[in-house]
Amino acid sequence: MDPLSGTQQSSWRPHPSISAHGDERIIAIVLVTIIVFSVSPMARAQASPPGEYELKAAFLFNFAKFIDWPADSFASSQSPFTICVLGLDPFGNILEDDLQGKMIGNRPLAVRRIKDKAGVRLCQIEFVSSSESAHLAEVIGSLQSANVLLVGETNGFAASGGTIEFTLEDNHVRFTINIDAVGRSGLKFSSKLLSLAKILHEGHSKGG
């Protein structure tokens, strides 16, 4: 199946013999709907491969679809599903360009930039920029009992208490999930999402 078609293959299961290239393709099939290619087949065939932050934007969108948020995570039934960026924004216009008009369940998706941890509780997904690495402990501490998914790309982000850490391996985007942080957040992760990640317990980790 074309990995950019957006159609999932429910029969797929991860296998340790999959090559790095094959693993990247399967992750695209199962998890990442490459939003930037949701155009006509001819335009899709002529498009260049997505860049790092286009892929990360697509991952953020799909994380939202593979995680259940409690109803009281939102101010009201009409509240949007909000992806926020804390600190210096590495995405530029990619989040707006790629996510505009998308829905998470029956909620429209919104993108916000926030300048300090005070606004983090207004978000469902919080991407913590590398510029905030020195303040990570404060950000995590401000989210006790909050249903917020903390995502970052700073080395050691997950081990420091962040929920999901993006990594680059052989120029491919991968991610690590801190399962203890998941428990603290009160969010329910799909087993399919967990099966695609490297799982970290605070103290040790294992490959996914």
Image: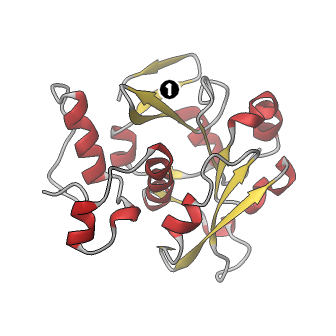
Residue type at numbered disc 1: Leu
Q: Position of residue 60 (x, y in %)?
A: 51, 53
Q: Is residue 186 above or below residue 64?
A: above
Q: Position of residue 192 (x, y in %)?
A: 33, 47
Q: Residue furthest top?
A: 203
Q: Residue furthest bottom?
A: 78
Q: Which residue is mark 1?
A: 200
Report the side of 175 relative to 117 (left or right): left
The colour scheme used here is: secondary structure
Figure quadrant of the C terminus: top left
Kindly identify the residue that appears in the image at 68 percent across and 70 percent down. 74
Report the side of 10 relative to 130 (left or right): left
Report the side of 45 relative to 64 (left or right): left
Instruction: Answer with the quarter of the image where residue 128 lies.
Output: top right
Report the side of 46 relative to 37 (left or right): left
Q: Is residue 5 visible to us here?
A: no
Q: Position of residue 102 (x, y in %)?
A: 49, 74
Number of numbered discs on residues: 1
Q: Is residue 82 visible to us here?
A: yes
Kindly identify the residue that appears in the image at 69 percent across and 34 percent down. 130
Q: For mark 1, does the 10 Å Cα neighbourhood hold few (<14), some (14 to 19), or many (20 or more) residues?
A: many
Residues 177 and 22: in front is 22
Residues 144 and 30: in front is 30
Q: Is residue 51 above or below residue 170?
A: below
Instruction: Answer with the quarter of the image where residue 14 lies.
Output: top left
Q: Position of residue 197 (x, y in %)?
A: 40, 35
Figure quadrant of the N terminus: bottom left
Kindly identify the residue that appears in the image at 20 percent across and 26 percent down. 16
Q: Is residue 80 above or below residue 22?
A: below
Under tag 1, what secondary structure? Answer: strand
